[in-house]
Image: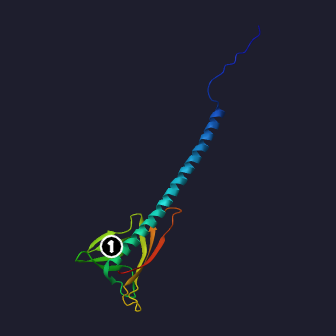
Amino acid sequence: MTDAKKYTVSSGFTLIELTIYGGLLSILLYILSDMFLSVFSMQLTTGADMALKQDGAFVLSRLTYDVRRAESISVPLSGQTAIGMTLVIDAGGTDETHVYSVTDGNLVATVDGVPYAINGQDTQITDFSVERVGNQPEIPDGRDTVHIEFTIAPRADIPQAPDAVEFSTAIGLR
C-alpha cells in the first residue's frame, strides 16, 4: 500500500475572502452614507427656502390686511420714507395704534403697547422701509398709499440655501 496523504477540508473564510467582503461592505456603506447626506442637505435647503417664502408671504399679507383696515397712517409722513410704520385701526369702536418696527431681526407689531413678532423664528427681517406715497392730486377720492420693502433671510447659515429674498409691495387704505 502506498502512503496516502489525507487532506482535511476546513470550513471557514480565508483572509482574502474576508478582505474582499470588507472592501465591498465599505464601498456600500460609503455610497449609502453619501446618499443620506445628500438627501439631508437637500431637505435643509428646501426647508430654509420654504421658510423664507412662507414668512415673506405672511408678512406681506399681514401688512396688507392691517393697512387696508387702517383709518390713518401716522408714520411715515406723506412723501417720506421711514424704517417703521404707525397705523390707527378702528377695533370695534375704539382706536388701536399699531406700530411696526424691526427689533433683533424680527418685524414686531406693537398693538397698544403689546409687542409680538410677525416673522417666524427661523428667519430675520432686514432693510425694512416704508414710503408713504400719499394722495394723488389727480385722483379726488384717492387714498393714502404706502410702498413697503423688506428683505428676509435665514437665521442659520445653510449651504446652498438662498441668502435672502427681497419683497416689495404697494398698499392703499380702503
Q: Which residue is mark 1?
A: 109
- Asked if residue 103 shows in the view, the reply is no
Quadrant where the C terminus sits is: bottom left
Asked if residue 48 is positioned above or below residue 133 in the image, the reply reads: above
Find the residue positioned furthest to the right.
Answer: 2
Quadrant where the N terminus sits is: top right
Q: Mark 1 falls on what kind of element?
A: strand
Find the residue positioned furthest to the left.
Answer: 93
Asked if residue 117 is positioned above or below residue 37 in the image, the reply reads: below
Q: Position of residue 60 (x, y in %)?
A: 41, 72
Q: Amino acid at mark 1?
A: Ala
Q: Residue at x 64, y 32 (%)?
A: 15
Q: Position of residue 2 (x, y in %)?
A: 77, 10
Q: Residue at x 41, y 63 (%)?
A: 122
| Residue 141 position by quadrant | bottom left
- Asked if residue 9 shows in the view, the reply is yes
Total residue callouts = 1
